[in-house]
Amino acid sequence: MPKKDITVPNIGDFKNVEIIEVLIKKNQKIKKNDPLITIESDKSSVEIPSTESGMITYLNVKIGDKVSEGDKILEIETNENLKEKIETKLDGQKNLENSNKENESETKKIFNNEDLVVKNFSVKTSASPKVRKFARELGIDISKISGSERQGRVTEDDVKLFVATKSNEISKNEQSNKKKIEQEYSHSEFGEIEIKEIPRVKKISSKYLMNSWTNIPHVTNHDEADITELEEFRISLTDMYTGEKKKITPLAFIIKALTASLKKFPNFNSSIDDIESGKLTLKKYYHVGIAVDTPHGLMVPKLRNADNKNISLISTELKKLSDQCRNLRIDKKELFGGSMTITSLGGIGGSFFTPIINFPEVAILGVGKSKKKQVYMDGKFVIRTILPLSLSYDHRIIDGAEAARFNNDLKENLGKNFAYKLAV
């Protein structure tokens, strides 16, 4: 049977999309619709499936390659005529090995020649004696300067531009180095160690976390909400058609309560892209960010238009968003455009903490694990279910009094009177 090419299908208007995963290898047997590669654009990550079944005889891509519609991914041979396939495969491998050896030899020759050319050019940089002297006085290697004149001739202005560029780089490095503490001893001097790659999601999120923590003056207001009636109501919810108990996460109620508070305190649903401009962006939509713990790192998708959704729908969408994040199938745009973020440790444990604001938002709500506590009410101690709340806010926009009022309103929304309204 003739070999068939598997190519990149129609991926819309995207071109030169980077391959972030290669899910198959040469000589592997695959079935139709098996995933072959994962590509990532600015907006999302997508798996490309196979359109044929058979054995891979040639793999044309690797991680980091950029592909467009119609580009060849691999060659595949169908499972028919096994004997002929094996003989063809063995011959192909021999030819490929010989071809690779020839290519490798030719490549070495080419690179050796290019090395010589580069070395000759670096020595013969074109510049006048005056410019050479100027560069020497500044301690600059003139061969590292790209000339702006004809045939790459270096001028005095080129030298000045080179110095200015390097000065800026040195200044940035010096500022960065001031913040670093040198390690006097390597970790391996004290015992066995292991070096691991930082997950890609964590590397991407690190710059956003550093920007938020460095540039936003954080203040955190800690409080407790009595959610006794809310929990009793949540646990008692049943499907009106089947009579089965509904499994609604407490987070769905918290989202609904937070949305109600955002409507009363619009400053919490705002952003300041540039404080120097003196402009505040007040959002008229209510897209609540949810911090999702994944094996790849923390991701914060947005639950859109939370004010227009009931508790049951919010709970369903929360599960869908969490699954998309854990499987890296979330559209990149869904990680942006939020009103305010909720980060919950309720399923793990802990009480109060200091959550970092998700820039360009101005506040974030941290939720701890609810606990049974004795509370003095109506002249006696009673057992109540208490939920720890940690509200971090941007002190440039929100002051302490406003934050306290916001927390009080949120507690009321989570209390007995509002719990029933949330389900409507």
Image: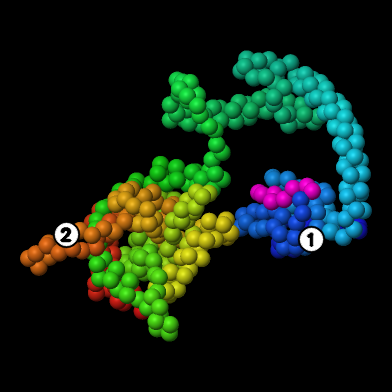
Q: Classify residue 72 as left or right of residue 328.
A: right
Quick one: which residue is furthest to the front in this view? 83
Under mark 1, the amino acid is Ser
- How dense is the environment of label 1, judged by Cα within 10 Å: few (below 14), some, or many (20 and up)? some
Residue at which label 1 appears:
53
Residue at horizontal 65 percent and vertical 58 percent from the top: 46
Q: Quadrant of residue 64?
A: top right
Q: Nearer the viewer, residue 388 or 3?
A: 3
Residue 4 place in picture, x, y as percent:
86, 57
Q: Nearer the viewer, residue 360 or 228?
A: 228
- How dense is the environment of label 2, judged by Cα within 10 Å: few (below 14), some, or many (20 and up)? few
Q: Nearer the viewer, residue 393 or 184?
A: 184
Q: Classify residue 31 as left or right of residue 171.
A: right
| Magenta-highlighted residues | 19-27
Residue at which label 2 appears:
374
Residue 89 place in picture, x, y as percent:
88, 48
Quick one: which residue is furthest to the left in this view? 379
Residue at horizontal 54 percent and vertical 61 percent from the top: 324
Of mark 1 and mark 2, the one earlier in the sequence is: 1
Q: Is residue 151 magenta?
A: no
Residue 29 place in picture, x, y as percent:
77, 54
Label 1 to label 2: alpha-carbon separation: 65 Å
Name the quadrant of the N terminus. bottom right
Q: Nearer the viewer, residue 313 or 82?
A: 82
Whether 228 is drawn above or below 355: the answer is: below
Q: Quadrant of residue 280?
A: bottom left
